[in-house]
Image (cartoon, grey):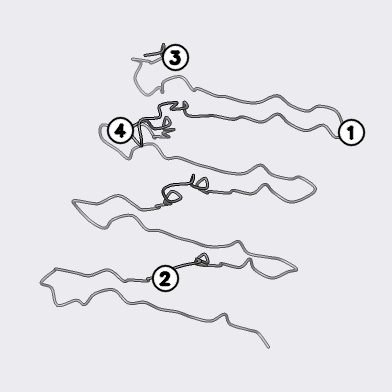
Amino acid sequence: QGGDVFMSAGQTTAASKEGGDFEIKAGTGASTTQGNGGDVTIYGGEGKGTDNGLSMGGDISLIGGTAASNSGGSIYVTTGMGTQDSSGQIRLSTYDSGPQGVSGDVTVLTGDSSAGDSGQFTLSTGYATGGTGGFVDVIVGTGTSGQGGYISLSAGATSGTDGLTGGDVTVTTGSSSR
Protein backbone atom coordinates (compact mmCIF):
# COMPACT_ATOMS: atom_id res chain seq x y z
CA GLN A 1 0.00 0.00 0.00
CA GLY A 2 1.03 3.63 -0.33
CA GLY A 3 2.63 5.42 2.57
CA ASP A 4 0.50 6.90 5.34
CA VAL A 5 0.58 10.47 6.59
CA PHE A 6 -0.05 10.95 10.29
CA MET A 7 -0.15 14.35 11.96
CA SER A 8 -1.00 14.83 15.61
CA ALA A 9 -0.97 17.66 18.11
CA GLY A 10 0.94 17.11 21.33
CA GLN A 11 -0.42 15.40 24.40
CA THR A 12 -0.12 16.64 27.95
CA THR A 13 0.07 14.78 31.24
CA ALA A 14 -0.46 17.94 33.31
CA ALA A 15 -3.58 18.10 35.47
CA SER A 16 -6.46 20.32 34.27
CA LYS A 17 -4.81 20.98 30.90
CA GLU A 18 -5.87 19.96 27.40
CA GLY A 19 -3.85 18.44 24.61
CA GLY A 20 -2.63 20.67 21.82
CA ASP A 21 -5.03 21.99 19.18
CA PHE A 22 -4.75 21.07 15.51
CA GLU A 23 -5.86 23.71 13.04
CA ILE A 24 -5.96 23.78 9.25
CA LYS A 25 -6.64 27.18 7.76
CA ALA A 26 -6.51 28.50 4.21
CA GLY A 27 -4.90 31.81 3.40
CA THR A 28 -6.50 35.21 3.84
CA GLY A 29 -7.34 37.32 0.79
CA ALA A 30 -6.12 40.56 2.29
CA SER A 31 -6.83 42.85 -0.65
CA THR A 32 -9.85 45.15 -0.24
CA THR A 33 -10.56 44.63 -3.97
CA GLN A 34 -12.03 41.15 -4.51
CA GLY A 35 -9.79 39.64 -1.86
CA ASN A 36 -11.19 36.12 -1.56
CA GLY A 37 -10.08 33.71 1.13
CA GLY A 38 -8.52 30.43 0.04
CA ASP A 39 -10.38 27.12 0.02
CA VAL A 40 -9.72 24.00 2.07
CA THR A 41 -10.43 20.78 0.19
CA ILE A 42 -10.07 17.30 1.66
CA TYR A 43 -10.36 14.29 -0.62
CA GLY A 44 -10.56 10.60 0.10
CA GLY A 45 -8.20 8.51 -2.03
CA GLU A 46 -9.25 7.32 -5.47
CA GLY A 47 -9.89 3.60 -5.99
CA LYS A 48 -8.67 2.82 -9.50
CA GLY A 49 -9.57 -0.89 -9.45
CA THR A 50 -11.88 -2.17 -12.19
CA ASP A 51 -12.86 -5.42 -10.44
CA ASN A 52 -16.62 -4.89 -10.68
CA GLY A 53 -17.55 -3.19 -7.42
CA LEU A 54 -14.78 -4.52 -5.18
CA SER A 55 -12.60 -1.40 -5.30
CA MET A 56 -13.92 1.68 -3.55
CA GLY A 57 -12.80 5.26 -3.04
CA GLY A 58 -11.39 6.16 0.35
CA ASP A 59 -13.60 7.48 3.15
CA ILE A 60 -13.40 10.75 5.03
CA SER A 61 -14.22 10.41 8.71
CA LEU A 62 -14.76 13.24 11.19
CA ILE A 63 -14.82 11.88 14.73
CA GLY A 64 -14.93 13.85 17.96
CA GLY A 65 -12.59 12.87 20.76
CA THR A 66 -13.40 10.13 23.27
CA ALA A 67 -13.81 11.10 26.93
CA ALA A 68 -13.18 8.69 29.80
CA SER A 69 -15.67 10.19 32.26
CA ASN A 70 -17.67 12.94 30.53
CA SER A 71 -19.23 13.74 27.16
CA GLY A 72 -17.26 12.96 24.02
CA GLY A 73 -16.10 15.76 21.76
CA SER A 74 -18.58 17.48 19.46
CA ILE A 75 -18.37 18.17 15.74
CA TYR A 76 -19.31 21.67 14.60
CA VAL A 77 -19.82 22.56 10.96
CA THR A 78 -20.42 26.30 10.62
CA THR A 79 -20.31 28.51 7.56
CA GLY A 80 -18.40 31.76 7.43
CA MET A 81 -19.99 35.03 8.47
CA GLY A 82 -20.55 37.76 5.91
CA THR A 83 -19.94 40.94 7.90
CA GLN A 84 -21.78 43.02 5.28
CA ASP A 85 -23.67 40.34 3.34
CA SER A 86 -25.02 36.79 3.57
CA SER A 87 -23.39 34.03 5.54
CA GLY A 88 -22.12 31.00 3.63
CA GLN A 89 -24.21 27.97 2.71
CA ILE A 90 -23.93 24.36 3.80
CA ARG A 91 -24.61 21.80 1.10
CA LEU A 92 -24.67 18.15 2.09
CA SER A 93 -25.08 15.89 -0.91
CA THR A 94 -23.95 12.65 -2.46
CA TYR A 95 -22.47 12.48 -5.93
CA ASP A 96 -24.46 11.29 -8.94
CA SER A 97 -24.20 7.58 -9.68
CA GLY A 98 -22.32 6.12 -12.59
CA PRO A 99 -23.95 4.14 -15.44
CA GLN A 100 -24.67 1.33 -12.98
CA GLY A 101 -25.86 1.53 -9.40
CA VAL A 102 -27.72 4.21 -7.50
CA SER A 103 -26.69 7.52 -5.98
CA GLY A 104 -25.54 7.36 -2.38
CA ASP A 105 -27.76 7.68 0.67
CA VAL A 106 -27.73 10.51 3.18
CA THR A 107 -28.35 9.29 6.72
CA VAL A 108 -28.54 11.58 9.73
CA LEU A 109 -29.17 9.89 13.04
CA THR A 110 -28.40 10.19 16.71
CA GLY A 111 -26.74 7.45 18.70
CA ASP A 112 -28.44 4.87 20.86
CA SER A 113 -28.58 5.31 24.63
CA SER A 114 -28.34 2.56 27.22
CA ALA A 115 -29.27 4.77 30.19
CA GLY A 116 -31.74 7.55 29.41
CA ASP A 117 -33.03 9.29 26.32
CA SER A 118 -31.30 9.11 22.98
CA GLY A 119 -30.21 12.39 21.38
CA GLN A 120 -32.63 14.82 19.80
CA PHE A 121 -32.74 15.71 16.12
CA THR A 122 -33.71 19.31 15.36
CA LEU A 123 -34.27 20.77 11.89
CA SER A 124 -34.92 24.48 12.12
CA THR A 125 -34.46 27.68 10.18
CA GLY A 126 -33.37 30.93 11.78
CA TYR A 127 -35.36 33.86 13.12
CA ALA A 128 -35.81 36.75 10.68
CA THR A 129 -36.01 40.43 11.60
CA GLY A 130 -37.57 42.46 8.78
CA GLY A 131 -38.33 39.42 6.62
CA THR A 132 -39.86 35.97 6.56
CA GLY A 133 -38.46 32.94 8.34
CA GLY A 134 -36.66 30.49 6.10
CA PHE A 135 -38.52 27.65 4.41
CA VAL A 136 -38.14 23.95 5.18
CA ASP A 137 -38.69 21.84 2.07
CA VAL A 138 -38.91 18.05 2.10
CA ILE A 139 -39.03 16.91 -1.51
CA VAL A 140 -38.80 13.49 -3.09
CA GLY A 141 -37.03 13.46 -6.43
CA THR A 142 -38.81 12.59 -9.68
CA GLY A 143 -38.27 9.18 -11.27
CA THR A 144 -38.87 8.07 -14.85
CA SER A 145 -39.98 4.51 -14.05
CA GLY A 146 -41.48 2.57 -11.20
CA GLN A 147 -43.33 3.93 -8.22
CA GLY A 148 -42.60 7.41 -6.94
CA GLY A 149 -40.56 7.75 -3.79
CA TYR A 150 -42.36 8.19 -0.49
CA ILE A 151 -42.05 10.32 2.62
CA SER A 152 -42.43 8.54 5.93
CA LEU A 153 -42.81 10.26 9.30
CA SER A 154 -42.91 7.89 12.25
CA ALA A 155 -43.12 8.69 15.92
CA GLY A 156 -41.22 6.54 18.39
CA ALA A 157 -42.63 3.33 19.83
CA THR A 158 -42.27 2.36 23.46
CA SER A 159 -41.86 -1.02 25.07
CA GLY A 160 -42.07 0.37 28.60
CA THR A 161 -44.59 -0.94 31.15
CA ASP A 162 -45.36 2.41 32.76
CA GLY A 163 -48.63 2.93 30.85
CA LEU A 164 -47.32 5.63 28.50
CA THR A 165 -48.12 5.56 24.79
CA GLY A 166 -45.96 5.83 21.71
CA GLY A 167 -44.85 9.26 20.53
CA ASP A 168 -47.13 11.75 18.80
CA VAL A 169 -46.78 13.36 15.38
CA THR A 170 -47.76 17.03 15.60
CA VAL A 171 -48.08 19.31 12.57
CA THR A 172 -48.74 22.95 13.44
CA THR A 173 -49.21 25.88 11.09
CA GLY A 174 -47.55 29.22 11.78
CA SER A 175 -49.31 31.80 13.90
CA SER A 176 -50.06 35.37 12.81
CA SER A 177 -50.46 38.61 14.76
CA ARG A 178 -53.08 39.83 12.22
**Which dot, 2 or 3, sits closer to the camera?**
2
**Which dot, 3 or 4, sits closer to the camera?**
3
**Which dot, 1 or 2, sits closer to the camera?**
2
Look at the numbered discs 2 and 3 and tell me whether their residues touch, using CB distance below 8 Å.
no
Query: What amino acid does circle 2 point to?
Result: Ile
> How packed is label 1: few (under 14 Cα within 10 Å), some, or many (20 or more)?
few
N-term mark: 1 or 4: 1
Q: Image check: 135 left or right of 100? A: right
x 41%, y 13%: residue: 2
**Numbered badge on residue 67:** 4
Residue 27 screen position, x and y as percent: 70, 24
Q: CA distance from mark 1 to mark 2?
A: 47 Å
Q: CA distance from mark 1 to mark 3?
A: 37 Å
Q: Residue furthest top?
A: 3
Query: What amino acid does circle 3 point to?
Result: Val
Callout 4: helix, strand or loop? loop
The residue where tag 3 is placed is 5
**Which dot, 1 or 4, sits closer to the camera?**
1
The residue where tag 1 is placed is 33
Q: CA distance from mark 2 to mark 3?
A: 43 Å
N-term mark: 2 or 3: 3
Above or below: residue 84 compared with residue 62: below
N-term mark: 1 or 2: 1
